[in-house]
């Protein structure tokens, strides 16, 4: 699997699936979630509402992932995953790693070859970027999947630099 980094907006990515840093309500929020629903149009929210009414009455649990249409986005699917809120007192990194593993598992089910991820939990949910990047890159690189390209789409130059450092740690631990 190839891991690539770009600075940009995840909603414009031409890949099979884009991952949404959703919240457990699946009913929209700020950050990446807001951008995906704004640009993808109402079809995504309609499918999220159906998922809430059928499979996830109590919300999508943290660390899990589920797919919907991508509506008007260039991608075919949105994979919604719920990152953990960062806690200084409790190590929640296994839940963050689970977001990446579960998203790739769903991508495999869909047959998605190219998947774009944002820096899950590193916005409103407060995860320090360097640590979020190490968990993201470290998890994706050891997960067995048929996905051939994982593209991390970073919103800022600082986030890109953090992911770059995390990638170089893979070669020199
Ligand atoms: P969370 O609630 O999981 O922290 P956020 O959406 O608040 O999710 O932020 C996750 C990361 O995504 C942050 O680094 C934020 O800067 C970045 N981000 C926000 N909007 C976009 C976008 N349109 N494309 C890519 N990354 C984005």
Image (spheres, rainbow, N blue to C red):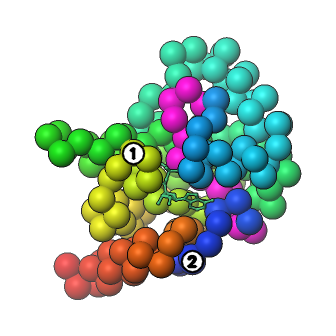
Residue, x 65% and y 56% (percent of image)?
18
Horizontal and vertical percent for residue 148?
Answer: 59, 70
Residue 6, which numbered label?
2
Q: Which residues are magenta?
A: 13-26
Residue for badge 1:
125
Are the residues tagged 2 and 1 within 8 Å (C-beta)? no
Horizontal and vertical percent for residue 71?
Answer: 82, 46
Q: Is 6 situated above or below 88?
A: below
Q: Is 24 situated above or below 54?
A: below
Tell me where residue 106 sits by quadrant: top right
Residue, x 52% and y 77% (percent of image)?
5
> Horizontally, is 118 left or right of 52 in the view?
left
Residue, x 75% and y 47% (percent of image)?
38
Ligand 1 within 8 A of label 1's CB? yes
> Horizontally, is 130 left or right of 153 in the view?
left
Q: Earlier in the sequence, mark 2 or mark 1?
A: 2
Locate the C terminus by quadrant: bottom left
Horizontal and vertical percent for residue 130?
Answer: 30, 68
Q: Is 164 situated above or below 57?
A: below
* Residue 75 appears in the figure: yes
Q: Is residue 152 magenta?
A: no
Residue, x 57% and y 14% (percent of image)?
57
């Amino acid at each position: 699997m190839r891991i690539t980094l770009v600075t940009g907006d995840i909603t414009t990515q031409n890949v099979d699936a884009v991952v949404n840093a959703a919240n457990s309500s699946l009913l929209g929020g700020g950050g990446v979630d807001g951008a995906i629903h704004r640009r993808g149009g109402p079809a995504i929210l309609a499918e999220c509402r159906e998922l809430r009414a059928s499979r996830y009455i109590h919300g999508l649990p943290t660390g899990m992932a589920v797919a919907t249409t991508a509506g008007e986005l260039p991608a075919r699917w949105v994979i919604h995953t719920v990152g953990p809120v960062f806690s200084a007192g409790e190590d929640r990194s296994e839940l963050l790693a689970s977001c990446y593993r579960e998203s790739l598992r769903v991508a495999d089910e869909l047959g998605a070859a190219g998947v774009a991820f944002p820096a899950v939990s590193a916005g409103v949910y407060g995860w320090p970027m360097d640590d979020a990047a190490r968990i993201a890159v470290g998890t994706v690189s050891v997960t067995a999947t048929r996905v051939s390209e994982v593209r991390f789409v970073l919103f800022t130059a600082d986030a890109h630099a953090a992911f770059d450092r995390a990638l170089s740690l893979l070669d020199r631990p």
